[in-house]
Amino acid sequence: MAFSVKSKKSGKTYFLHSKEVKLKGDRKQNIYYFAGEAGSNVLAALPAGYEVVENERTGLPMLRKNK
């Protein structure tokens, strides 16, 4: 089952994805992003130490580290 969030502003459902990217110096880092459809990189759960917040202006979900 994919982790999903429903926007309070638009009512649209977004699915959390993860992707490993390569940075300068061949350093690898995982990035997290939300998409309107569940793709191949979809996550089943929220990563530890993160929380979901919604942009007040656009209604898009964002992931941030817990405070």
Image (cartoon, helix red, strand yellow):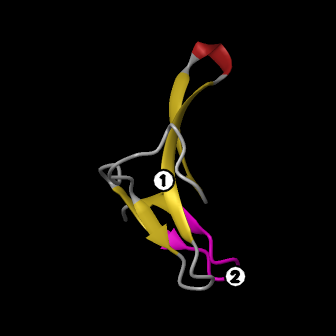
Q: Amino acid at mark 1?
A: Leu
Q: Quadrant of residue 10?
A: bottom right
Q: Residue at x 34, y 49 (%)?
A: 44
Comparing 26 with 44, the one in front is: 44
Residue at the spot of label 1: 16
- Relative to 20, residue 2 above or below: below
**Distance (Cα) linking label 2 and label 1:** 20 Å
- Relative to 49, residue 27 above or below: above
Q: Position of residue 27 (x, y in %)?
A: 56, 19
Residue at the spot of label 2: 57
Residue 57 part of the magenta-drawn span:
yes
- Relative to 45, residue 24 above or below: above
- Relative to 64, residue 30 above or below: above
Q: How many marks?
A: 2
Quadrant location of the C terminus? Answer: bottom left
Residue stretch rendered in magenta on the structure = 53-62
Q: Amino acid at mark 2?
A: Arg
Q: Position of residue 22 (x, y in %)?
A: 61, 22
Characterize the magenta stretch by its predominant secondary structure. loop
Q: Position of residue 57 (x, y in %)?
A: 69, 82
Comparing 10 with 22, the one in front is: 10
Comparing 61 with 36, the one in front is: 36
Q: Residue at x 40, y 46 (%)?
A: 43
